């Protein structure tokens, strides 16, 4: 099944930058990678029940908006080193 999704030019540019940083040729390839990752992992892997922590939908929206400012930096390839930070620290 195929669907058409309309997104803003700004969002498409952001996705293009993320794809380029990951060495991918297009947004379509980026989405394919994300889809493969999502289907390979359980849907609740790493999920945190924010409601049980007393965080409501309004607070979640606010948090997402504030964290969005960090997204570009966080998606940089050189930030991948932090994925293994805890293991590297434990080995010291």
Image (tube, grey):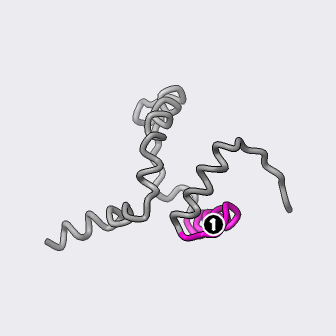
Name the quarter where the N terminus is drawn. Answer: bottom right
Q: State the residue in front, 38 or 73.
A: 73
Residue furthest bottom as drawn: 91
> Residue 56, position in %: x, y?
50, 28
Q: Is residue 88 placed above or below 61 in the rendered structure?
A: below
Relative to 18, is 80 on the left or the right? left
Relative to 3, is 65 on the left or the right? left
Based on the displayed image, in which of its 4 quarters is residue 57 positioned? top right
Based on the displayed image, in which of its 4 quarters is residue 83 positioned? bottom left
> Residue 58, position in %: x, y?
52, 26
Q: Residue at x 13, y 71 (%)?
A: 92
Q: Circle 1 sits on which residue? A: 39
Q: Residue at x 60, y 69 (%)?
A: 24
Residue furthest top as drawn: 58
Q: Is residue 3 placed above or below 34 in the rendered structure?
A: above
Relative to 88, is 4 on the left or the right? right
Q: Is 75 colored magenta in this rendering?
A: no
Q: Residue at x 26, y 63 (%)?
A: 86
Q: Residue at x 61, y 54 (%)?
A: 15
Element type where label 1 sits in the image: helix
Residue furthest right as drawn: 1
> Residue 11, position in %: x, y?
64, 45
Q: State the residue in front, 18 or 83.
A: 18
Prevailing secondary structure of the magenta residues? helix
Q: Is 31 colored magenta in this rendering?
A: yes
Based on the displayed image, in which of its 4 quarters is residue 69 positioned? top left
Q: Which residues are magenta?
A: 23-41
């Amino acid at each position: 099944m195929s669907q058409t999704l309309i997104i803003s030019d700004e969002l498409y540019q952001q996705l293009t930058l993320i794809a380029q940083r990951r060495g991918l040729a297009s947004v379509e390839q980026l989405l394919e990678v994300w889809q493969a990752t999502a289907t390979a992992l359980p849907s609740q892997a790493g999920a945190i029940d924010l409601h049980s922590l007393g965080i409501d939908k309004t607070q979640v929206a606010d948090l997402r908006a504030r964290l969005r400012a960090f997204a570009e930096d966080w998606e940089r390839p050189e930030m991948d080193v932090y994925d293994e930070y805890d293991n590297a620290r434990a080995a010291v």
